[in-house]
Amino acid sequence: MRRQEKLKQVKIAAQIKNEIVNAWPQEVLENVIFQCLHDYYNGTQWNLPPPYAVCSRQRHGAEMYMVQVKKNVEIPPLNLNLLFLNDPFIIQHCVIQHLSAEFVFGHQALDGLMLCKDSVHPDEYGNVSLDICLECHLSLSKEKMPQYALANNLYRGQLPSQFSDLTWVEEMVCAKYRNTAHITRLFQSTDPALPNVLHGNTCAHEMNVMSTASVLPRTPADLNGSLGVVFIGPGKMHKNISTPFFVSEKERSGIF
């Protein structure tokens, strides 16, 4: 009798142990860990879209037009002849001296035009398609030079191959001209005695780089498309809070 009770107790203890073991968190498999790391890495990458043919800008969500150029066409469509390379400095120092074929596309209507090669797509039949952004398409349709076209004095040659793998830190250190977008989330102080004290974190994002070397000093009109300050918050923004950060006392009255 005692033996049966003892066996019963052993059986119950073993059952409880199995239940505890089964309910205990299992060790995560190595392949699951690496898959999660891989997914995280891919999800945090900032992937730039392909550039546009006329301006070489890379823009997320921008409207695009695809322009077809047939094989036997001699005159480029959409007034693309406005983009013909005729700058003596670029011809001499960026094309001839470097023996560059940057603006040679293997099509009689396109050779010599200042286009970004990554957005010029030839097919097996000799036809070519161009990816053009909305702004450049509208300007060319009106027979006007697009503002951000490479042919609008915005081309300064290709980056030497030895600098192609620079990190963003190295680029920021050695770049003479650089544009970034800074996004700051500010929190107001909870101290009633310090109502205008703000604190927060700042994120910086690369922007489409505009040429500044040949047009300095820049006028305010040139900066309208790349400089902006936006305040978002639950309360009304007062000029006596923000203006000291951006303008002088003399200019302060014209901001608001």
Image (cartoon, rainbow, N blue to C red):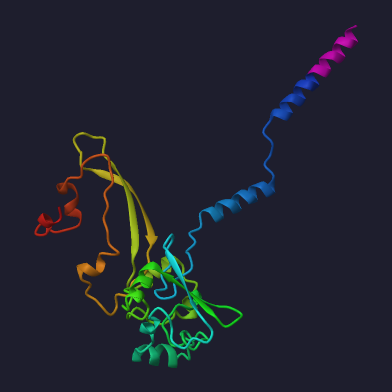
Answer with left or right where residue 137 lies relative to residue 222.
Answer: right
Q: Nearer the viewer, residue 191 or 58?
A: 58
Q: Residue at x 64, y 50 (%)?
A: 35
Compare residues 182 and 121 and report the one nearer the observer: 121
The spot of residue 46 in percent (x, y) is 48, 59
Query: How many marks can you see?
Result: 0
Our reading of the magenta stretch's main secondary structure is helix
Of residues 144 and 245, the one drawn nearer to the viewer in this rendering: 144
> Going by the image, does 8 lie left or right of 61?
right
The one nearer the camera, 59 or 182, is 59
Q: Residue at x 15, y 52 (%)?
A: 256
Q: Is residue 181 magenta?
A: no
Residue 97 is at least partly visible in this image? no
- The answer to whether 137 appears left or right of 219 in the picture is right
| Image location (x, y in percent) of residue 140 | 35, 76
Q: Is residue 109 above or below residue 242?
A: below
Q: What's drawn in magenta, residue-wise? A: 1-12
